[in-house]
Amino acid sequence: MEDRNQEDLRELFERFTEPTEAEAAARDIRLADGMLAAYPVPEPRPEVIIGIKLQIATTLATPPAKPHRLRRVLAAAAAVIVMAILVLLGRDPQTNPQTSYATLIPTAIWESDDIATDDMDIAYLASEISHIEDQVRALEAGQTQDVRVATLHEVETALMQINTEFWRE
Amino acid sequence: MGEGTELARIIEGCRSGDAEAFAQIVDMYAGRCYGYFYRLTSDRDLSEELLSELFLRLVEKIRSYKGGAFESWLFRVSANIFHDHLRGRQRRKKLLDGRRTELELRPTGDRKSDDKDEKLDKLQIQLNRLDADTRELIVLRFYSGLSFKEIADQRSEPIGTALSKLHRGLKKLRELMEG
């Protein structure tokens, strides 16, 4: 490497040390640069470079995935579950055992013809719901108030994170 | 057309998703970035993998490049890729330690008689004897061509600290090479 943006090493060192020491330090660095230059690294193999260019072309030719739909689904699921937990924490499940239901699947999926993508979204959603159901069951099983609050905070944090990413798009 | 203007035109092509513009970036920087990875990993195959990862990540991230020194940005992405690799390596530490030991203990007589290979081995071995941070600093400066100010910015440390570390590191490397 020859170009160091035409840096004047001595001048640079002089900002921190005596002129004589600066001169010696600059000389040390120039000598070391020469030593490094005397040991060149092999070039990457041509087939690797061709492979990289092909991968780039393929990536650019592939339409981007649709992560926003998944995020929308997860945000909806998380919002419903947070509501459920808030209700659970605010009421005694023994005296108010009835369950509220809400639509989790967004209209976009119902109206979409992209079955493969929708299936994947729904699989993610089902997995997320299953996980949150476990958390709700644990709460219902009589965990202490501290654990309930910690779980609520955890879910709220997840929701905030999902929503932040969702609105960024 | 000046070099900077030409680079700006190519980058603009990349930002608009032109594969040919990316191919030009690959041609311009593959050698230096490969050198950077190779000197840090001592492994040709791994360096090629990291190089591929770098350019594919560039495709993803080119829109986040907000102007300024492109090389500084490029080598920041390279450094991130190297550090990601290091984190992944923790899980495979035993295996790679074995390979490093094998490299360091390899008898001189086993090496090819080719002079270039002999030199590469020597520099690589002595670089590997430096601490990781110093080695990375030396390699970054040499292969990126960045100024000390850009290097200090990238490492989030004062320029005097970067200068001092590099000076001590290069002196140590020279002693090892001459010893």
Image (spheres, coloured by chain):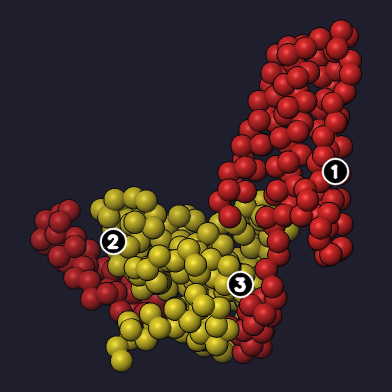
Lateral position of residue A165 relative to residue A104, left or right:
left
Q: Position of residue B156 (x, y in %)?
A: 37, 51
Chain letter for the residue marked with disc 3 in the picture? B
Query: Which quarter of the rendering shows the C terminus of chain A?
Result: bottom right
Residue position marked by numbered label 2 in the rendering: B149
At horizontal 66% and vertical 51% (from top left) the residue drawn is B90
Q: Earlier in the sequence, mark 2 or mark 3?
A: 3
Mark 2 in CB contact with mark 3 (< 8 angstroms) = no
Q: Residues within 10 Å of mark 1 (few under 14, many from 20)?
A: few
How many labels were placed on the picture? Answer: 3
Q: Is residue A40 above or below residue B57?
A: below
Label 1 vs label 3: CA separation?
30 Å
Chain letter for the residue marked with disc 1 in the picture? A
Residue lying farthest to the bottom in this orientation: B1
Q: Secondary structure at mark 2?
A: helix
Q: Position of residue A66 (x, y in %)?
A: 71, 61
At horizontal 29% and vertical 88% (from top left) the residue drawn is B2
Chain B pictured colour? yellow
Lateral position of residue B54 relative to residue A11, left or right:
right
B74 or B145: nearer the viewer: B74
Callout 1 amino acid: Ser
The dot on residue B56 is: 3
Lateral position of residue B45 relative to residue A12, left or right:
right
The dot on residue B165 is: none
At horizontal 62% and vertical 84% (from top left) the residue drawn is A53
Q: Which chain is red?
A: A
Residue position marked by numbered label 1 in the rendering: A127
Q: Is residue A141 above or below residue A5?
A: above
Residue lying farthest to the left in this orientation: A19
Q: Residues within 10 Å of mark 3 (few under 14, many from 20)?
A: some
Lateral position of residue A96 relative to residue A159, left or right:
right
